[in-house]
Amino acid sequence: MNTSDQLIIFDTTLRDGEQSPGASMNQDEKVRIAKALERLRVDIIEAGFPIASQGDFEAVQAVAAVVQDSRVCALARALDTDIIRASEALKQANASRIHTFIATSKIHMERKLKMTPDMVVEQAVKAVKLARKYTDDVEFSPEDAGRSEFEFLCRVIEAVIAAGARTINVPDTVGYNIPQQFGTLIRRLRERIPNSDQAIFSVHCHNDLGLATANSLAAVLEGARQVECTINGLGERAGNAALEEVVMTVRTRQDLFPCNSRIDTTQIMACSRLVSNITGFPVQPNKAVVGANAFAHESGIHQDGVLKHRETYEIMRAQDVGLSANRMVLGKHSGRHAFKNRLQQLGIDFSIEDELNSAFRRFKELADKKHEIFDEDLQALISDTKLALANERIKLLSLRVCSETGELPNAKVVLMLDGEVRTSNDNGSGPVDAVFRAIEVIVQSQALLKLYLVNAITSGSDAQGEVTVRLEKGGRIVNGQGSDTDILIASAKAYINACNHLMDTDARQHPQIGDV
Ligand code: KIV
Ligand code: ZN
């Protein structure tokens, strides 16, 4: 594939995706997702915003150290401090990129940056030149390009290309554009800017009007050759363009698109589930490509058609997105070796023997309750094991719930809080309510429960339930997840997981808020 035929896939699940309220991930989770993205053959992984916090810095470092086949990118505002920090975090990367940005719309320059257009151009150029001292691969984004004045956008882009930017990313930061308009913008920029042939044009679309994928694809038809996207469309507010939608559209409509990506589409489903499992953002059943119903045919006419000839109602094959991977992979009699092997295939390594032993013990316990263990079960089990081993302030030691017709449900919970064993007991209007109240007696988070969701990880009544809990306190939103074949235990784990996140006070800077 020559460069003009290749559509570069730039995944920003670990950066913009993490900006979804409550979707923060720890270092270990980011590394697991990065490995899954590498298996997916993503070209570039935006691993984070190193200046945001020490945790972000270390997570980018950890991703840079393990990823071999994808380029690892770090975000930096157009500031010396940010760029130097990004370059330090990327030191161990096999291939690295610094992505620097500054806002170019009138409203952002006047109201947020309080800078004149001349100052913005000067700062953008200075930032790109500094970034080029650390790497040849520098990407520049004029933030809020979708609402920027065209002539000014041309001026900034021409200047940063001359300064050494090799990718120009055009963000529709607030998801304001519509497809024809956005496609035209990309074409006009490429036509008007004299040195535009020295850079690859990229797009980064937000989904506020539900148009992120459509806008990205319209831009590709007009010459953009990089799309920035996220797994499951995760991202700030309504999210970013969904990787799976962009990739599968371009692949399915090769009659229209003059390019294609290198993505191994059979990894899409596994990656989607992993991201949903780690972030606690469930995938809606009717979500394109990765939703539970995406390949399910309900109506009799459709079922009949598909059985006679699949293409009557299906434009993609379920196997092509990795759906057939939902098969039994391990069972009660599987040994430690098979277990370890399967985890390695899923990109999960336990460097510490004790951790592997603990995961294997949990696997055996699960296999006793549920005789078919799928990849999805393993992913949930690993998240659970890692949580249990992590240095969390609150841990669940035991739970007993009584629920009987005509009686108020009661829960007795034993927790470890900061190393001390604590017991409590409470009633609730239902068993889940009783569990959460009993936990609250000890933890006293006083947070508001914003979301409670149960999802069966696989099919069958012996499936593990995966519970998502979203809590809000003082404007801060956190998600928690837990899984178990017993959904009350899964609920307790999810609530405790969310409380642990609330207690984590690693203060992060938001990349797009505040002064430059
Ligand atoms: O939406 C946006 O403008 C961004 C930039 C940092 C590229 O996320
Ligand atoms: Zn964004």
Image (cartoon, rainbow, N blue to C red):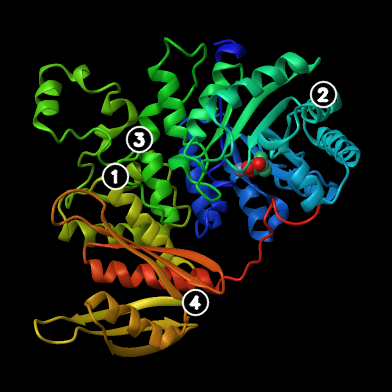
What's the amino acid at mark 3? Ala
* Crowd around label 3: few <14 · some 14–19 · many ≥20 (10 Å): some
Question: What residue is at 75 percent from the left and 57 percent from the top?
Answer: 514
Q: Are marks 1 and 3 in contact (CB under 8 Å)?
A: no
Q: Which residue is mark 1?
A: 285
Sequence-first disc among 4 and 1: 1
In the image, taking residue 243 as reference, residue 27 lies left or right, namely right
Q: Residue at x 51, y 65 (%)?
A: 477
Kind of residue at disc 2? Glu
The kind of residue on which mark 1 rests is Pro
| Local secondary structure at mark 1 | loop
> Which disc number belongs to residue 62?
none
Q: Residues within 10 Å of mark 2 (few under 14, many from 20)?
A: many
User: In terms of sequence position, does the residue under pointer 2 or pointer 4 come before the other?
Assistant: 2
Q: What's the distance in space between the residues labelled 2 and 4, CA to CA?
A: 52 Å
Question: Toward the viewer: 34 or 125?
Answer: 125
Q: Considering the numbered disc 2 on the image, is that residue within a helix, a strand or a loop?
A: helix
Q: Quadrant of residue 361?
A: bottom left
Q: Is mark 1 within 8 Å of ligand 2?
A: no
Q: On the image, numbered disc 2 is attached to which residue?
A: 158
- Which circle, 2 or 4, is nearer the viewer? 2
Q: Secondary structure at mark 3?
A: loop
> Which labelled disc corresponds to residue 288?
3
Distance CA(mark 3)–CA(mark 4):
38 Å
Report whether 365 appears left or right of 209: left
Numbered disc 4: secondary structure: loop
